[in-house]
Image: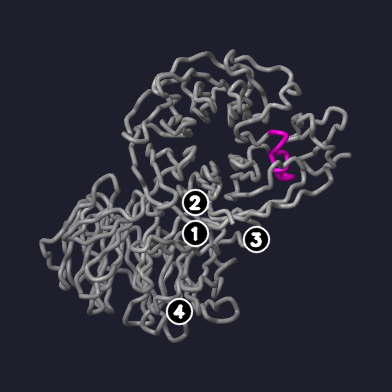
C-alpha cells in the first residue's frame, strides 16, 4: 500500500518494516524498530491533545522601524516584533499579544481614545491574508475591529496615523511602494473601510506621517530630502505644500516629527538640527542647530509642554522647555543598547526609549535608564534549553550570547562573544554552554562566570550543530564542510581532545542525535541523508537496519522513522529547519521556512499526520526546543530576531 502525492511519496515495506520516503525525488529509506506494528500509510494520525499558547515574546523591532512604542492607559507599553504586537506591563511583568497579522508588522499607531490600535504589515507567506494590510483592533479585548487596504497597499504599510482633532474617525496610511501612496480611510465604515482620498506622496522614502493634533484636515509627512504639509479639502482631495528650507540647511533626511503645545510642527533631521514650522505654514519659524551629532530620530512633546529629543548616533536624550530652549538636562544611553530610535512618554517624568539595537529602556532624563526589553539585532540561529532548569541560551549573527530565565522572562546575562553564532548546546549536566560559530570556531563558556573555558577551530565553514553525549564524555560538532568532528571531554567540560572526524556525508551536516548509551550518532545532511556512526571510532555504521532498535536521547534529526509525518506533502527537504522531541517522548515540535511552529503527537510514523500549527514568527523558524520539564516550548525566528515562548496546555 502506498500514499502518493506530488513530490512526497511514501511506501511501506511490510517485510523489513521500512518506509521509503521521497524528498525532491530522492529516496530515503527509514527502518522502524523491530517491534513496530504494521503501518498503513494511507491512515491519518490525529493531532496531539496538547496545544500551544503564546506566553512570552522576547525582543523588539527598533533596528529599522520608527514610531512604534506607546504607553497605554492600562499601564502597558505597546510595540511589535516579528508578526506579533506585544502589550507589556513592565511593572507587573506580564504580556498580552495581538496575533492577527500573518507577517512582519512594520508600524503601529494609537487612536486618540487610547483604546484602539492600528497596525500595518508587509506581504506575507500565506496564500490567505498574504497581501499587505492594516488591522484596527481593541487593545483591551484584542478583538479585530477592521481589516483595511488589502489589494490597495503595495509591498508594506510604512506609516499610519489616526486623525486627532475629530476624535479619530480617519486613518491615514503611507505605503512602501515606489510612489509611497498616501491614502485616507474612514476606517469605521462597515464596507471594510472607505478610502476617502488617495494620491502619490513622494518618489523618495517616507519615514513618518502624522495628523495635526488640532486640525482634522492637516497631515504632515517627512522623509528623504523633504517635509510635506497636506490639506484634505471639502471634496476629499489631498493638496501638498513642500516645506521650504534655506538651501544650506536642507537635510538629506527629515527623520522625525512632533507637535508643540501651540500646534507648531517640530521636525528633526539627519544633520542633528530641530526646525519649528509655524502652524498652518510651510516655512521655518525657528531653527535649533546641532542638537545631536548625527540624526535626530525622535521628538517627544510631553504633556507639560517640554520637548525631549533622542539621537540615533550619539545616544543622547536632551530635554528642552516648551519654546525649545535647552534646559541643560540630558543623559546618554549606554552604547551597547544602541542609539535612540523612539521616545515615548510614560507616567509623570518617566520615558520609554526604543533603541536601534532592539532594546526598550525605561527611566527619566535626570535619573537615567535601565532595560525593560532586551533582544537580538541580527539573525538568531542558536537556541538551547538547560537540561534541568527553566533557563535557555540564544545566540545569533549579532555575536550576542544571552542567558534567559523562562519563568521570570528576563535576561540573566548578555555577552558579546565577538563571533557570529550559528548553534549552541548545554553539556548534559548544565555546567557549560558550547557555541558553534560561522567562522568554524566553537567556544565553551561557563554559565556562572561567563568566562571562555575553551575554544577550537574545525575547518573554515560554519558549525551547524553541536551536541554533548548523554554521559558528557563526548561532543559532536557538525560542520557545513560535510564532516562531524568528535571530541573527548575532560576536566568537567573544560578540556577537549579530538578523537577524529566522521567522513561519509556528501552535503553539509544539518542535525545530529546521540544514542542514550552515548555509543552512536545519527545525522542528517543537506541532501536528505540519514547516516549512523560509531562515536568512539568515528566510523560509519553501514547497515542502517542494524540500528533500528537503538534508543535515541533526542530527535533533533527530522529525517527519521519516528518523524516521517512531520514532512508536508509538498516538502522539498529544506523546509523544516528544526525538530525537537519532548523529554517525555509524547510530542514533537518543528520550525519551518514559512514562519510556522507545528506540534505533533510522537512518534510521527504515519506519513499523513495532523498537527497544530502556530504563526507569530515572520521569518524562517531556525530552532525549536522544549524546556527541561516540557511545560514550555521555545522558538527562534531567524531574520525576525524574536524568541517566542509557548505554554503547553
Decide if residue 188 is on the left or right side of residue 310: right
- Residue behind mark 2: 644
| Residue 27, visible in the rendered structure | no
Whether 284 is drawn above or below 641: the answer is: below
Could you tell me residue 426's position as x and y percent? 46, 33
Question: Cβ–Cβ below 8 Å for labels 1 and 2?
Answer: yes
Query: Residue 211 is drawn in which quadrant?
Result: bottom left
Decide if residue 155 is on the left or right side of residue 528: left
Q: Which mark is residue 170?
A: 4
SS class, disc 4:
strand
Could you tell me residue 52's position as x and y percent? 59, 55
- Residue behind mark 3: 128
x 62%, y 55%: residue:
51
SS class, disc 1:
strand
Precedes in sequence: disc 2 or disc 3: 3
SS class, disc 2:
strand
| Number of other residues with Cα within 10 Å of mark 2, as a class: few under 14, some 14 to 19, many 20 or more | some
Query: Residue 116 is drawn in which quadrant?
Result: bottom left
Decide if residue 118 is on the left or right side of residue 564: left
Q: Quadrant of the C terminus?
A: bottom right
- Residue behind mark 1: 84
- The span shown in magenta is 560-572
Amino acid at each position: 500500500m502506498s500514499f502518493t502525492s506530488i513530490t512526497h511519496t511514501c511506501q511501506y515495506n511490510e517485510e523489513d518494516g521500512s518506509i521509503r520516503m521521497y524528498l525532491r525525488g530522492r529516496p530515503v529509506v527509514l527502518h522502524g524498530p523491530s517491534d513496530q506494528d504494521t503501518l498503513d500509510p494511507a491512515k491519518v494520525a490525529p493531532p496531539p491533545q496538547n496545544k500551544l499558547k503564546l506566553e512570552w515574546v522576547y525582543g523588539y523591532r527598533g533596528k529599522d522601524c520608527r514610531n512604534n512604542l506607546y504607553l497605554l492607559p492600562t499601564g502597558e507599553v505597546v510595540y511589535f516584533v516579528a508578526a506579533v504586537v506585544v502589550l507589556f506591563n513592565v511593572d507587573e511583568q506580564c504580556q498580552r499579544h495581538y496575533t492577527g497579522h500573518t507577517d512582519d508588522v512594520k508600524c503601529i499607531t494609537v487612536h486618540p481614545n487610547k483604546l484602539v490600535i492600528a497596525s500595518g504589515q508587509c506581504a506575507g507567506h500565506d496564500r490567505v491574508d498574504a497581501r499587505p494590510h492594516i488591522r484596527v483592533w481593541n487593545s483591551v479585548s484584542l478583538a479585530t475591529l477592521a481589516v483595511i487596504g488589502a489589494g490597495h497597499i503595495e509591498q508594506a504599510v510604512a506609516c499610519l496615523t489616526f486623525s486627532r482633532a475629530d476624535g479619530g474617525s480617519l486613518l491615514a496610511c503611507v505605503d512602501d511602494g515606489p510612489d509611497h501612496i498616501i491614502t485616507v480611510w474612514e476606517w469605521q465604515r462597515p464596507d471594510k473601510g472607505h478610502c476617502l482620498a488617495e494620491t502619490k506622496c513622494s518618489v523618495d522614502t517616507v519615514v513618518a506621517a502624522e495628523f495635526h493634533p488640532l486640525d482634522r484636515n492637516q497631515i504632515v509627512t517627512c522623509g528623504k530630502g523633504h517635509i510635506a504639509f497636506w490639506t484634505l479639502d471639502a471634496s476629499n482631495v489631498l493638496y501638498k505644500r513642500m516645506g521650504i528650507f534655506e538651501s544650506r540647511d536642507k537635510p538629506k533626511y527629515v527623520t522625525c516629527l512632533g507637535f508643540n503645545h501651540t500646534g507648531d510642527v517640530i521636525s528633526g533631521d539627519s544633520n542633528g538640527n530641530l526646525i519649528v514650522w509655524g502652524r498652518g505654514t510651510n516655512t521655518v519659524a525657528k531653527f535649533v542647530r546641532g542638537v545631536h551629532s548625527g540624526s535626530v530620530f525622535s521628538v517627544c512633546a510631553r504633556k507639560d509642554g517640554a520637548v525631549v529629543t533622542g539621537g540615533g548616533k550619539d545616544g543622547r536624550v536632551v530635554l528642552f522647555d516648551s519654546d525649545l530652549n535647552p534646559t541643560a538636562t540630558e543623559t546618554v544611553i549606554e552604547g551597547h543598547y544602541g542609539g535612540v530610535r523612539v521616545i515615548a512618554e510614560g507616567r509623570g517624568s518617566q520615558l520609554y526609549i526604543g533603541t536601534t539595537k532592539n532594546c526598550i529602556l525605561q527611566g527619566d532624563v535626570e535619573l537615567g535608564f535601565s532595560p525593560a526589553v532586551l533582544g537580538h539585532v541580527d539573525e538568531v540561529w542558536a537556541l538551547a534549553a538547560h537540561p534541568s532548569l527553566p533557563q535557555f541560551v540564544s545566540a545569533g549573527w549579532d555575536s550576542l550570547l544571552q542567558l534567559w530565565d523562562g519563568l521570570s522572562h528576563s535576561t540573566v546575562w548578555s555577552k558579546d562573544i565577538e563571533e557570529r553564532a550559528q548553534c549552541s548546546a548545554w553539556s548534559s549536566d548544565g555546567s557549560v554552554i558550547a557555541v558553534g560559530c560561522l567562522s568554524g570556531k566553537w567556544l565553551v563558556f561557563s554559565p556562572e562566570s561567563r568566562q571562555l573555558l575553551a575554544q577550537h577551530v574545525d575547518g573554515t565553514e560554519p558549525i551547524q550543530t553541536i551536541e554533548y553525549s548523554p554521559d558528557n564524555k563526548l561532543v559532536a560538532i557538525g560542520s557545513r564542510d560535510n564532516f562531524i568532528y568528535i571530541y573527548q571531554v575532560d576536566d568537567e567540560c573544560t578540556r577537549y581532545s579530538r578523537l577524529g572526524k566522521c567522513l561519509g556525508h556528501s552535503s553539509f551536516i544539518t542535525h545530529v542525535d546521540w544514542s542514550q548509551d552515548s555509543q552512536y550518532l545519527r545525522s542528517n545532511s543537506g541532501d536528505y541523508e540519514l547516516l549512523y556512526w560509531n562515536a568512539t571510532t568515528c566510523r560509519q555504521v553501514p547497515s542502517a537496519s542494524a540500528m533500528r532498535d537503538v534508543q535515541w536521547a533526542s530527535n533533533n534529526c527530522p529525517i527519521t522513522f519516528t518523524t516521517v509525518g512531520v514532512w508536508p506533502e509538498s516538502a522539498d527537504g529544506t523546509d523544516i529547519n528544526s525538530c525537537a522531541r519532548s523529554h517525555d517522548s509524547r510530542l514533537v515540535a518543528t520550525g519551518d521556512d514559512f514562519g510556522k511552529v507545528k506540534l505533533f503527537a510522537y512518534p510521527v510514523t504515519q506519513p499523513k499526520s495532523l498537527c497544530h500549527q502556530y504563526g507569530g514568527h515572520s521569518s524562517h523558524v531556525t530552532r525549536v526546543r522544549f524546556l527541561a520539564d516540557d511545560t514550555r516550548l521555545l522558538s527562534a525566528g531567524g531574520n525576525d530576531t524574536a524568541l517566542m515562548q509557548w505554554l503547553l496546555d
